[in-house]
Image (tube, rainbow, N blue to C red):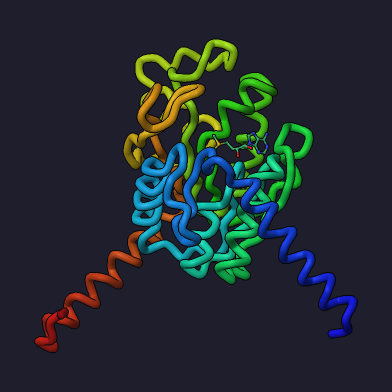
Amino acid sequence: MNITSTLRSTAQNIIDELQFKFDVYPRLQYQPLPWIGLKRARRGHGTVARWKAIESSLDGLAIGSAADIGCSVGYFCIALALKGIPVLGIDMDARSLRIAQYASRKLGTRNAGFSNMLVSPATASLLPNADLIVLTSVWHHWILHYGFDGAGQIMSTVWERCGKVLIFETGEQEMPAEFDLPPMDPSPKVWLENYLASVCPGSTITHLGRFRAFGPGGDEKLYVAERNLFKVARLSLDGEHRSDQARSARRSDLRVDTGTSAT
Ligand SMILES: C[S@@+](CC[C@H](N)C(=O)[O-])C[C@H]1O[C@@H](n2cnc3c(N)ncnc32)[C@H](O)[C@@H]1O
């Protein structure tokens, strides 16, 4: 490396460190990044708890690729990348993406990429194909900006791009009237299950639980709300689930037969 490029990369590192400190001040705005020591965030507990539910819902599925639409600072992207799943995080917010890229660089997760894009009815066709698509707490923004039909149009493209599993969550009744969300009767859980069934044909929908979130201006202590999390799986996956169950059954038979026990 010549002197100019050494100086350049030293200066760039200083700029990156300063930029990172500036970007995360005063605290992370939504997701935490515990891997780089940032455990506190406005939706810290809700994010870690959602990840546990998402991770166990993927048990037994061969997930070879993932995309996270509205990835924020990349908590789910990094968690997936650390499991060895190549992932593309997409978000329209440059500050969040800078933080995600910084964290990913520090962790050496070279199987995670990040793209700055406003996902809209006009750009949805650019979304990638992936076995797993994570779409959490973004749909209500689409309703706000593109209306119910516009959001439905994007949802149809997301489902077309999704090879195996879509993880879905949205803002619910805690969102202010300006979002113009539908009434979600008889309950958000039932309404969202019916909605997902209509925009994701050929799927089975599993409710993964309710997770801590908040209304505008809040955090996990102020204006606390809970949001429903769903796994939407392609019906063609039934075989994959069944053959995986059969494989585990065969493995446990084998353990019994050989008399070995787990430690
Ligand atoms: C409430 S946060 C949810 C973050 C993350 N998905 C989660 O559940 O932890 C919404 C994120 O989606 C992004 N977002 C909202 N509308 C978007 C759009 N139309 N295109 C791309 N990103 C969008 C925001 O910048 C923000 O990072």
Please, which residue is most extreme toward the bottom here? 258
Residue occupying the far left of the picture: 259
Which of the image's four quarters has the C terminus?
bottom left
Q: Pinpoint residue 103: horizontal percent, then vertical percent.
A: 58, 60
Residue at image point 30% right, 72% down:
247
Q: Is residue 145 left or right of residue 230?
A: right
Q: Position of residue 37 (x, y in %)?
A: 46, 58
Residue 183 image offset from top left, x and y in percent: 46, 13
Camera-nearest residue between 3 and 119: 3
Q: Residue at x 68, y 55 (%)?
A: 18
Position of 197 relative to 59 (above/below): above
Q: Which residue does the image show at 55% across and 56% down from the upper left?
A: 77
Provide residue 76's location: percent of width, then percent of height: 50, 52
Camera-side residue: 65 or 233?
65
Q: Residue 218 lies in what quarter of the image?
A: top left
Q: Is residue 105 above or below residue 173?
A: below
On the question of residue 234 being in view, the answer is no
Say which of 232 and 1 sits in front: 1
Image position of 91 (left or right of 132)? right
Residue 40 visible in the displayed image:
yes
Q: With 32 as the anchor, is 4 left or right in this view?
A: right
State which quarter of the image contains the N terminus.
bottom right
Please determine whether, in this image, residue 210 is positioned above or below residue 102: above
Picture quadrant where residue 119 is located: top right
Q: Residue at x 68, y 40 (%)?
A: 93
Ligand 1: image quarter: top right
The number of discs equals 0
